Image: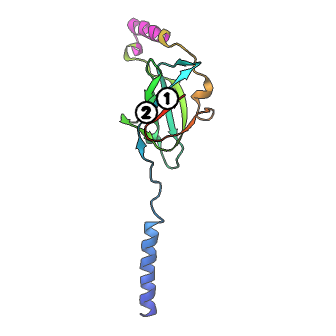
Amino acid sequence: MTNLKFCALFLILGSLILSLGCGPQNVPPEIVAAGGTVTLNGKPLFNCQVEFIPLAKGLDGNYKAFGVTDTEGKFNLELPGSKPGCPACDCKVVVVEGPFPDEARQTNDEGAAAFMKFKKSLTNRPIPKRYQSMAKTPFKFSVADGAQFEI
């Protein structure tokens, strides 16, 4: 084999290797089922939004999982677009006030009455500020399939 052919073969193989990289880059983690219960002072926290923010590099807001607690403080996580699950990786967790019902969002007298009634139903408040901030939250979990969290 001549030096020219060897150089050409080397350049072709080198280019191929460089274009492939060193294996998969930024492969997102598996999406798994997860949920749990939120309590404050030993009592269920109704209608709060629980947000699991993945700490894996390269994941954007499409991987932030969330759930809203029911009257027993239970939630199931889902991704944007109502896709069930959460990335199987380390996540920081924040807990914030949940959404108001549609009738409490109206700008008329009925909406104001519904808003006041709904606010009164939110017992066991306020949610401590440290749980509402990603920078301050003490909650960090490693999510695995079927995980159930006590917050």
From the image, give the main secondary structure of the stretch colored magenta: helix
| 18 is higher (above) or lower (below) than 71 | below
Q: Quadrant of residue 136?
A: top right
Q: Mark 1 highlights which residue?
A: 50
Tell me where the magenta segment starts and ends, as one range.
Answer: 104-119
Query: Residue 57 location in percent, x, y?
Result: 53, 49
Q: Quadrant of the C terminus?
A: top right
- State whether residue 53 is above or below residue 56: above
Label 2: element kind: loop
Residue under the image location 41 percent in, 89 percent down: 5
Q: Decide which of tag 2 and tag 1 comes sooner along the chain.
A: 1
Name the residue beneath numbered marker 2: 77
Disc 2 to disc 1: CB gap under 8 Å: yes
The residue sitting at 47% across, 58% down in the picture is 25
Q: Is residue 26 left or right of residue 130?
A: left
Q: How many marks?
A: 2
In percent of width and height, residue 23 lies at: 46, 63
Identity, as a three-letter code, of the amino acid under mark 1? Val
Figure quadrant of the N terminus: bottom left
Q: Badge 2 local density, few (<14 within 10 Å), some, or many (20+)?
A: many
Query: Is 58 above or below relative to 70?
Result: below
Residue type at mark 2 is Leu
For the residues marked 2 and 1, what is the alpha-carbon distance in whole angstroms?
Answer: 8 Å
